[in-house]
């Protein structure tokens, strides 16, 4: 039987023709014993499906053509539930969806038959499903007459169904699980019909959806169609007015008529919402208020991170395309499942917090909290933008990026690929269909998150790559394009040599460090970010009783940086000029100003300095901008200062800490506070 780990192994083998055993073991982060155990599971499942097992020959995989076709067809695998080992969470979500579309009173025996579990396991799953429902505003209850059934508002039931579907679709066998639930009620034809109908209408109306979101919408609408329930109005009049204001509302009328003959009027609103949260691109003129909101978020990000945005027009357009679906998800409380959230929070610790603060205008506008899952995708968006705007290199090879996972994922993928292949020129296309319209002479290779047919080399990737995945991708590209190969060895060969001569205590960490050293040494992504206490040392802290003009205060605050040769004299001029041009933007509130300018305007090394003025300084001579703490920042790039700035922001946002800083009389006292 397949479980998630063994199916991932199956996917890796099928989708990467030349991958070796050692590379698979490292990519999936499993032991050699686990690998052979999972391979045996895969082969047992293939045999039960009357297919040939996968064989090994000199560390390479030998796969039968029929087995390859099984996965590459794109449709759900034709397997039954007993071929799948389900986790407890998967069973609970499937149990809910099964009840959501029930066609007769449901008993515990129904759940046993669906999930291939014992009576006691089914009862335990029901108990946990009840707890899940209660958290989401739905009640799963039992009566002799109706069996297990759901009570609560129709919208809450649909939200939970959407959450369950979206979660399962992030799993390797999610599509298969959902089809099996439909099959259990003999309703699988609805899935095919919904898919065909949506494809036809969307194509005719020129509506393009993010690929992953489209899969979610198709399954969600399928389950809604199968569900037999009397539909009361789902939306308030105010909500309906908001949905009607969208051009999309009229475009989906035909789709509502074909999918929901009996409830077309009410479901047209629901369809509009579902399509809105899955849109790939939105015209700027359609939502002027969201354009303004986009600008407010970018301004907040600039202020919070002290990073001047260079190509603001590009960022506004791409962020707007991400913001529109997010706005409607948050406004209508449609749950978002983001499988990358924990990875994003680990990789972009400080940036995640800055983005969270910068999204305050969105939270205020919707009057709703913003989940970590939503913040995660916005973080990807800003992180990708910052990495994309690093210094550019000479380009020789042309590559296409096909990423249908959404704007944020696409920008992040492009940034990672630029990091790994600085000499490749990248162009983005949205869909696999668009590739077929391009002349093959216009590109040399393709990086894609979806299946693409092309005579040129095609590399399938994830939106967010681990170090191990980056190494494998780099080596795969170097095999196809020797121009990039400066070495006659692989990372696995290096690891084997090291293992011969010493004991490796942390193999995963060693491999990651070697990838950084050999393949990513041309970039400082993921490089060292000093703490606040490492930048604001005793030599960088000053106090003065002198009455100063704002220019004199900035010059005095920057003096320690100048003496330490962290900045050039022209950087001070640039900071003053910035205030004159932009205004009092450096005043972040509570009498604190953070003067700064662009790195290229005179920064030599990363630095930060502190000046406490006993006599408040009027910034630009304005009474409402009186400053008594100046903190000069000299940033060398988009990232190195973020850790220190994040710590500083936390300190300054705490009133007790801020008062202690203002009461400090010596540099030692300041350093004690910031440690």
Image: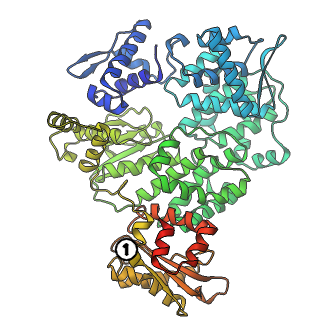
Q: Is residue 446 above or below residue 525?
A: above
Tell which of 593 and 659 is nearer to you.
659
Q: Position of residue 466 (x, y in %)?
A: 38, 41
Q: Position of residue 644 (x, y in %)?
A: 46, 64
Q: Is residue 405 above or below residue 553?
A: above
Tell which of 472 and 499 is nearer to you.
499
Quarter holding residue 320: bottom right
Q: Is residue 558 above or below residue 159?
A: below
Q: Which residue is mark 1?
A: 600
Quarter holding residue 208: top right
Q: Is residue 640 left or right of residue 111?
A: left
**Which residue is pictured at 43% across the width and 82% down the height?**
558
Residue 382 appears in the rendering: no
**Disc 1, SS:** helix
Q: Is residue 182 above or below residue 232?
A: above
Instruction: Report the residue that reaches farthest toward the bottom.
Output: 547
Q: Is residue 278 left or right of residue 431?
A: right
Residue 530 appears in the rendering: yes
Colour mapping: rainbow
Q: Position of residue 594 (x, y in %)?
A: 52, 75
């Amino acid at each position: 039987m397949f479980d998630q780990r063994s199916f991932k192994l199956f996917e890796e083998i099928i989708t990467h023709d030349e991958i070796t055993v050692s590379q698979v073991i490292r990519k999936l982060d499993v032991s050699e014993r686990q690998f052979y155990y999972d391979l045996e599971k895969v082969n047992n499942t293939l045999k039960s499906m009357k297919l040939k097992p996968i064989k090994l020959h000199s560390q390479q995989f030998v796969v039968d053509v029929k087995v390859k076709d099984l996965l590459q067809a794109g449709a759900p695998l034709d397997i039954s539930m007993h071929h799948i080992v389900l986790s407890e969470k998967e069973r609970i979500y499937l149990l809910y969806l099964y009840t959501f579309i029930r066609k007769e009173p449901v008993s515990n025996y129904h759940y046993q038959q669906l999930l291939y579990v014992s009576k006691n396991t089914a009862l335990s799953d029901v108990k946990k499903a009840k707890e899940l429902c209660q958290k989401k505003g739905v009640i799963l209850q039992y009566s002799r007459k109706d069996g297990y059934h759901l009570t609560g508002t129709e919208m809450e039931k649909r939200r939970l169904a959407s959450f369950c579907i979206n979660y399962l679709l992030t799993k390797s066998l999610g599509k298969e699980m959902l089809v099996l639930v439909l099959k259990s009620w003999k309703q699988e034809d609805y899935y095919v019909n919904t898919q065909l109908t949506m494809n036809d209408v969307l194509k005719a109306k020129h509506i393009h959806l993010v690929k992953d979101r489209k899969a979610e919408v198709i399954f969600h609408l399928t389950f809604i169609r199968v569900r037999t329930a009397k539909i009361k109005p789902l939306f308030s009049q105010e909500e309906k007015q908001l949905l009607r204001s969208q051009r999309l509302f009229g475009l989906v009328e035909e789709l509502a008529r074909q999918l929901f003959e009996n409830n077309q009027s009410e479901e047209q609103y629901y369809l509009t919402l579902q399509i809105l949260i899955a849109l790939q691109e939105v015209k700027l003129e359609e939502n002027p208020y969201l354009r303004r909101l986009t600008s407010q978020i970018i301004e907040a990000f600039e202020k919070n991170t002290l990073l001047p945005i260079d190509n603001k027009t590009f960022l506004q357009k791409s962020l707007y395309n991400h913001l529109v679906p997010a706005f409607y998800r948050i406004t209508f409380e449609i749950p978002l499942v983001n499988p990358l959230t924990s990875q994003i929070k680990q990789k972009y610790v400080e940036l995640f917090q800055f983005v969270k603060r910068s999204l305050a205008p969105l939270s205020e506008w919707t009057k709703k909290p913003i989940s970590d899952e939503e913040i995660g995708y916005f973080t990807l968006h800003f992180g990708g933008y910052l990495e994309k705007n690093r210094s550019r290199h000479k380009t020789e090879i042309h590559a296409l990026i096909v990423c249908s996972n959404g704007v944020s994922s696409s920008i992040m993928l492009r940034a990672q690929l630029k990091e790994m292949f600085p000499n490749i020129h990248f162009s983005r296309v949205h869909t696999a269909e668009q590739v077929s319209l391009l002349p093959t002479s216009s590109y040399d290779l393709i990086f894609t998150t979806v299946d693409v047919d092309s005579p040129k080399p095609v590399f399938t990737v994830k939106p967010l790559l681990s170090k191990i995945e980056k190494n494998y991708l780099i080596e795969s590209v170097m095999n196809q394009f020797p121009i990039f190969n400066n070495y006659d060895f692989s990372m696995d060969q290096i690891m084997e040599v090291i293992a011969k001569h010493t004991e490796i205590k942390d193999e995963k960490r060693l491999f990651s460090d070697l990838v950084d050293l050999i393949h990513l040494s041309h970039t400082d992504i993921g490089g060292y970010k000093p703490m606040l206490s490492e930048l604001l040392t005793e030599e960088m802290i000053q106090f003065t009783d002198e009455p100063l003009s704002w220019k004199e205060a900035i010059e005095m605050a920057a003096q320690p940086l100048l003496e330490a040769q962290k900045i050039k004299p022209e950087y001070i001029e640039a900071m003053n000029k910035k205030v004159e041009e932009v205004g009092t933007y450096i005043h972040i509130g509570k009498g604190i100003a953070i003067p700064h300018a662009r790195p290229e305007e005179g920064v030599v090394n990363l630095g930060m300095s502190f000046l406490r003025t006993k006599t408040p300084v009027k910034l630009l001579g304005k009474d409402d901008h009186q400053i008594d703490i100046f903190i000069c920042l000299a940033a060398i790039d988009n990232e190195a200062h973020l850790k220190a700035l994040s710590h500083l922001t936390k300190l300054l946002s705490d009133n007790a800490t801020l008062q202690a800083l203002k009461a400090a009389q010596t540099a030692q006292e300041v350093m004690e506070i910031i440690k």
